[in-house]
Amino acid sequence: MKTVEIRPVREDEHEQAWQVLRELRTQVDREAFDHALARQAQAHGYTLLGAFEGGDVVGVLGMRVVHTFARGAHLHVDDLVVTAEARGRGVGRQLLAYAEEQARERHLGWLFLDSRPGAVGFYERQGYRRHESVLIKKRLDGEHGD
């Protein structure tokens, strides 16, 4: 297994991070990525982590501390993505372990995330369990589809 360094993505690495994110979020162009990253960081303390192999970004994970009445203070993970080439080498597991450690250091007792059905098995193998709440949504802009 190659050595992987997990750390926050620097601004000069945004292009690489965006290319990785696009493997999951194909609709996000570079301008939207930069705008959302800046907005999330300012409004929610969002941090984009990168998994680096020899200077190349092979995985990303977004995380932010959230406070709700239902869940209290917890770490929420957004968009854990590993490049197709790097999957199966433990990169996702290492990104998630880093986020968990960050949560512990902040004295947060929980980490929550949303998952695509095809990725649930990966999270369950890491000790995650399905939450009993059901996610409900309604599109308000008049568009059709999800």
Image (cartoon, helix red, strand yellow):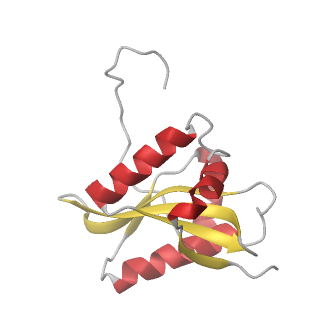
Q: Is residue 126 visible?
A: no
- Please determine whether, in this image, residue 144 is positioned above or below residue 17: above
* Quadrant housing residue 47: bottom left
Residue at 68% from the left image edge and 46% from the top image edge: 23
Q: Give percent across and percent down for residue 133.
A: 35, 49
Q: Nearer the viewer, residue 29 or 66?
A: 29
Residue at 31% from the left image edge and 22% from the top image edge: 140
Q: Is residue 79 visible?
A: yes
* Quadrant housing residue 14: bottom right
- Please determine whether, in this image, residue 51 is positioned above or below residue 116: below
Q: Give percent across and percent down for residue 66.
A: 28, 61
* Quadrant housing residue 91: bottom right
Q: Give percent across and percent down for residue 136.
A: 36, 36
Q: Nearer the viewer, residue 140 or 6?
A: 6
In the shown orientation, is residue 107 left or right of residue 18?
left
In the shown orientation, is residue 144 left or right of residue 15?
left
Looking at the image, which residue sits at the far bottom?
105
Looking at the image, which residue sits at the far front?
12
Count of numbered circles on the image: 0
Looking at the image, which residue sits at the far left?
69
Quarter placement of the N terminus: bottom right
- Please determine whether, in this image, residue 123 is positioned above or below residue 18: below
Residue at 60% from the left image edge and 46% from the top image edge: 117
- Please determine whether, in this image, residue 19 is positioned above or below residue 88: above
Q: Give percent across and percent down for residue 34.
A: 47, 48
In the shown orientation, is residue 144 left or right of residue 91?
left
Residue at 38% from the left image edge and 77% from the top image edge: 103
In the shown orientation, is residue 114 left or right of residue 73?
right
